[in-house]
């Protein structure tokens, strides 16, 4: 199998974060891209679900971005809120 070199345009901060995560997994970025490419071929598509976000998901993201979500001091408080 022959190899080719390619270039990508990526968000610099996300690339650094991804490389650090991959390093902790024992992979480098090239390994990860090769794994992704092999999975696209094997599954004949994206190797994960690609869907439009639901209204509830968009609302949750907005709450997170604007710090409108609930805060809990510990998991006990969280579970009590979930039970109510």
Image (cartoon, grey):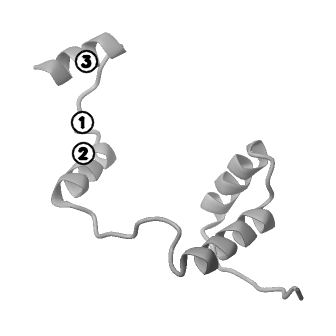
Judging by the rendered image, the residue that carries numbered circle 3 is 79
Cα–Cα span, label 3 and label 2: 19 Å
Q: Earlier in the sequence, mark 3 or mark 1?
A: 1
Vertical order, 35 against 77 (above or below): below
Q: Are marks 1 and 2 in contact (CB under 8 Å)?
A: yes
Q: Residues within 10 Å of mark 2 (few under 14, many from 20)?
A: few
- Residue at image coords 18%, 53%: 56
Q: Using residue 41 as the reference point, say whether residue 82 is left or right of it.
A: left
What is the secondary structure assignment of the residue under circle 2?
A: helix
* Residue 78 sits above or below residue 2 on the image: above
Q: Nearer the viewer, residue 47 or 69?
A: 47
Quarter of the image for the C terminus: give it. top left
Task: Find residue 69 and name its label.
Answer: 1
First in sequence: mark 3 vs mark 2 = 2
**Rendering coords of residue 62 (x, y %):** 25, 52
Disc marking residue 16 = none
Whether label 3 touches label 1, CB < 8 Å: no
Contact, mark 3 vs mark 2 (Cβ under 8 Å)? no
Q: CA distance from mark 1 to mark 2?
A: 5 Å
Marks 3, 2: nearer the viewer: 3
Q: Position of residue 81 (x, y in %)?
A: 18, 20
Q: Position of residue 63 (x, y in %)?
A: 24, 45
- Which label belongs to residue 63? 2
Query: Nearest the camera: 82 or 69?
Result: 82
Give the image quarter of residue 5.
Answer: bottom right
**What is the x, y in percent for residue 20?**
73, 48
Q: Secondary structure at mark 1?
A: loop
């Amino acid at each position: 199998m022959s190899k080719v070199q390619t270039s990508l345009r990526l968000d610099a901060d996300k690339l650094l974060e991804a490389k650090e995560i991959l390093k902790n997994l024992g992979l480098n970025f090239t390994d990860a891209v090769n794994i992704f490419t092999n999975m696209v071929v094997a599954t004949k598509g994206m190797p994960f679900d690609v869907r439009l976000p639901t209204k509830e998901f968009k609302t949750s993201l907005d709450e997170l971005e604007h710090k409108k979500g609930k805060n809990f001091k510990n998991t006990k408080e969280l579970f009590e809120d979930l039970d109510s």
